Image (cartoon, helix red, strand yellow):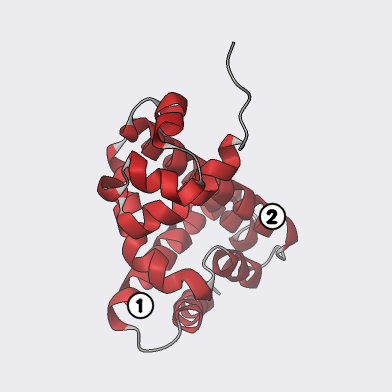
Amino acid sequence: MARPKTIPDEQVLDALLDSLMESGPDGLTFARAAKACGLSPATLVQRYGAREAMVQAILLRAWDRLDAETEAADAVEAPTPEGAINLLLRLMPPKTAERDASNGLLLLREDIRDPVLRRRGAAWGHRLAEALGRRLSKDPTHGKRLGWQMASLWQGAYTWWAFTREEPPDRAICRVLEEWVARLK
């Protein structure tokens, strides 16, 4: 008979995400993961089988969290272009911008390489483009195209901020998005 889990998977995976952000996917061993979440390496092997499966589970949990954050932001932001900007800024908290810009790229690499994670990211991108598009145009087809453009601009502005860091991230990205929205009118 299997023993009951003393720590739920979601709690373990949330604790492991921070460790994964610090070490990168290649640096996360079962020993390091065990220290981060309070379970033994053997227990983690029992739960996930292989280190790669554990990394995938952590990243799928991160996608779950991003889906929930996106849905929450979509529910509260105004159905206007300004609401679209605010939605994106909610998904990029300034206090973690530094960490996310550098270490997050290591995770993004894994998301692109792994077909399961890549599909998950693509699905989120479609939902995000639709949420933004509803705020940018009454025409769903045109709106989704604008939503993809805005999401791409957001990610590009974030990447360039990571290089230049000439102003706080939220201010830099908001400025770029506001300039783009102003050109739509």
Q: Residues within 10 Å of mark 2 (few under 14, many from 20)?
A: few
Task: Give the farthest residue toward the bottom.
Answer: 166
- The residue to which callout 1 is attached is 161
In which quadrant is the N terminus drawn?
Answer: top right
Q: Amino acid at mark 1?
A: Trp
Residue 154 placement (x, y as % from top left) = 44, 66
Q: Residue at x 51, y 67 (%)?
A: 92
Q: CA distance from mark 2 to mark 1?
A: 26 Å
Residue 131 placement (x, y as % from top left) = 61, 53
Q: Residue at x 39, y 36 (%)?
A: 41
Q: Secondary structure beneath disc 1?
A: helix
| Res 11 → quadrant | top right
Q: Residue at x 44, y 33 (%)?
A: 44
Q: Is residue 80 visible?
A: yes
Residue 141 placement (x, y as % from top left) = 54, 47
Q: Amino acid at mark 2?
A: Ala
Vertical arrangement, residue 58 with respect to residue 3, above or below: below
Residue 81 placement (x, y as % from top left) = 61, 69
> Which callout, 2 or 1, points at the residue further toward the start of the chain?
2
Q: Which mark is residue 72?
A: 2
Q: Is residue 153 visible?
A: no
Q: Residues within 10 Å of mark 1 (few under 14, many from 20)?
A: many
| Res 101 → quadrant | bottom left
Vertical arrangement, residue 78 with respect to residue 69, above or below: below
* 78 or 24, nearer to the observer: 24
Q: Is residue 158 left or right of residue 10?
A: left
In which quadrant is the C terminus drawn?
Answer: bottom right
* 50 or 67, nearer to the observer: 50
